[in-house]
Amino acid sequence: MKIEKVELAWLAGVIDSDGCIGLYQYKPSHGYNTIVTRPSVTIVNTNELMIRTVENIAQRLNISYYCNIKKWSESTNWKDCYSIAFQNKESALKILEESKNYLVIKKEQADIVIEFCKNKKNKHNKKTKLDDKLYKRIRILNKKGNA
């Protein structure tokens, strides 16, 4: 199915407003004795229709994703929270390449994650100096609080 430009512009607006584009470092528990860096594009919102619309776009673009719902107890008086995440090299790269031309606020983070994804040969490459450089740049951009 063809994706319209307006849908990609809408997706970029959702990523700019309710998304997080980042690089995360962790030590895998399955035998690797090194730190691994992975990309992530995550969108979180209390509006289920928004997340389902992103899911529909991802399906039509043949991009893998993970959806989750956080249900709160009735005593909290909070709305349920929905999320969709693109957390591997291929899916993060594709969702960002498709929406990048329409991003405004998080365009620099998208450029960093795209560069990271394009420089990774496989899923479990050892951390490189470039990984560290990109990781530090995106951490500064995504820093919370007063800069």
Image: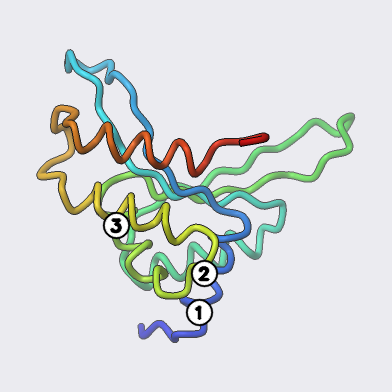
Mark positioned earlier in the residue sequence (1 or 3): 1
Tag 3: residue type? Leu
Q: Which residue is mark 3?
A: 93
Q: Residues within 10 Å of mark 3 (few under 14, many from 20)?
A: many
Residue 14, position in %: x, y?
58, 64
| C-alpha distance separating marks 1 and 3 | 18 Å
Q: Which mark is residue 11?
A: 2
Left or right: 74 as drawn, with respect to 110: right
Residue occupying image coordinates x 19% and y 28%: 127
Give x and y (percent) for residue 145: 66, 34
Residue 108 lies left or right of residue 128; in this view the side is right
Residue 85 percent location from the top left of the image: 46, 48
Residue 47 occupies which quadrant of the picture? bottom right
Disc 2 and disc 3: Cα gap in Å? 15 Å
Q: Which residue is mark 1?
A: 7
Q: Few, some or many C-alpha atoms within 10 Å of disc 1 (few <14, some 14-19, many ≥20)?
A: some
Q: Is residue 76 left or right of residue 85?
A: right
Is the Cβ of the residue at disc 1 closer than 8 Å to that at disc 2? Answer: yes
